[in-house]
Amino acid sequence: MADFRHETSRLILRDWQDDDWPDFWQNTNTQAVMRWLGGVCNEEKRAGARARLESYRTEFGHTFWVVERKEDGAILGFCGLKRCNQAGGPIGMMEVGWRLREDAWGKGYAKEAAAASLDLAFSEFAAEEVVALTVEGNTPSWGLMTRFGMRRRKDLDFANAEFDPETGLIIVYSIDRDAWFSSDA
């Protein structure tokens, strides 16, 4: 399997390298970034996340890729595609997801990386529909989903208190191939 690399105007989405991980965790494993993602990860959770991301690439040919800023090579976080595997969720559906470090917020990087990932889902990985997961309180995340033309799928929402103990609910948005290619995103 060839190394994955996809460029946008400001970003590079690419496969993980061993030396990416320390910088990724230093800049994304913070209270602010992890607020809606189950909290700051200990060493065991970090190792599990790394193993999962690497296994997605091996098993499916895609994962949540490194997001690297072209301008300076900074690792901003991750964005990409995986198969939904959350207990109770829409298991096996193509999922787009992103996590960026705090100093990268509000600059359009998440939108740029997620739009590229959605393009790839439909053009390279034969997805018919793609879901995105978040929690009700994470308004920046589901706000981006709605700006992409994704629609709320209450029928796919599922119980999971790991990410938002207050509601105990993961909310799901989705978009299909036709809607994506006819959107303005």
Image (cartoon, helix red, strand yellow):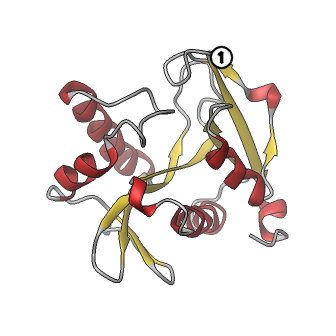
Q: Residues within 10 Å of mark 1 (few under 14, many from 20)?
A: few
Residue beneath the point at 60% across and 64% down: 111
Is residue 79 shown left or right of residue 14?
Answer: right
Q: Is residue 8 above or below residue 118?
A: below
Is residue 147 shown left or right of residue 8?
Answer: right
Nearest the viewer among 83 and 137 is 137
Is residue 110 shown left or right of residue 52?
Answer: right
Tell me the element at label 1: loop
Nearest the viewer among 111 and 173 is 111
- Numbered-mark total: 1
Q: Is residue 90 above or below residue 119?
A: above
Residue beneath the point at 55% across and 15% down: 165
Q: Is residue 156 above or below residue 77?
A: above
Q: Amino acid at mark 1?
A: Thr
Residue beneath the point at 66% across and 30% down: 90
Q: Which residue is mark 1?
A: 167
Q: Is residue 57 visible?
A: yes
The percent position of residue 110, horizontal first and vertical second, equals 54, 61
Is residue 66 shown left or right of residue 165?
Answer: left
The percent position of residue 125, horizontal first and vertical second, equals 57, 60
Residue beneath the point at 80% across and 72% down: 184
Q: Quadrant of the C terminus?
A: bottom right
The percent position of residue 143, horizontal first and vertical second, equals 71, 50
Q: Residue 77's quadrant in the figure?
A: bottom left
Q: Quadrant of the N terminus?
A: bottom left
The percent position of residue 88, horizontal first and vertical second, equals 61, 18
Nearest the viewer among 152 and 62 is 152
Q: Is residue 1 visible?
A: no
Q: Is residue 131 above or below residue 122?
A: above
Nearest the viewer among 129 and 26 is 26
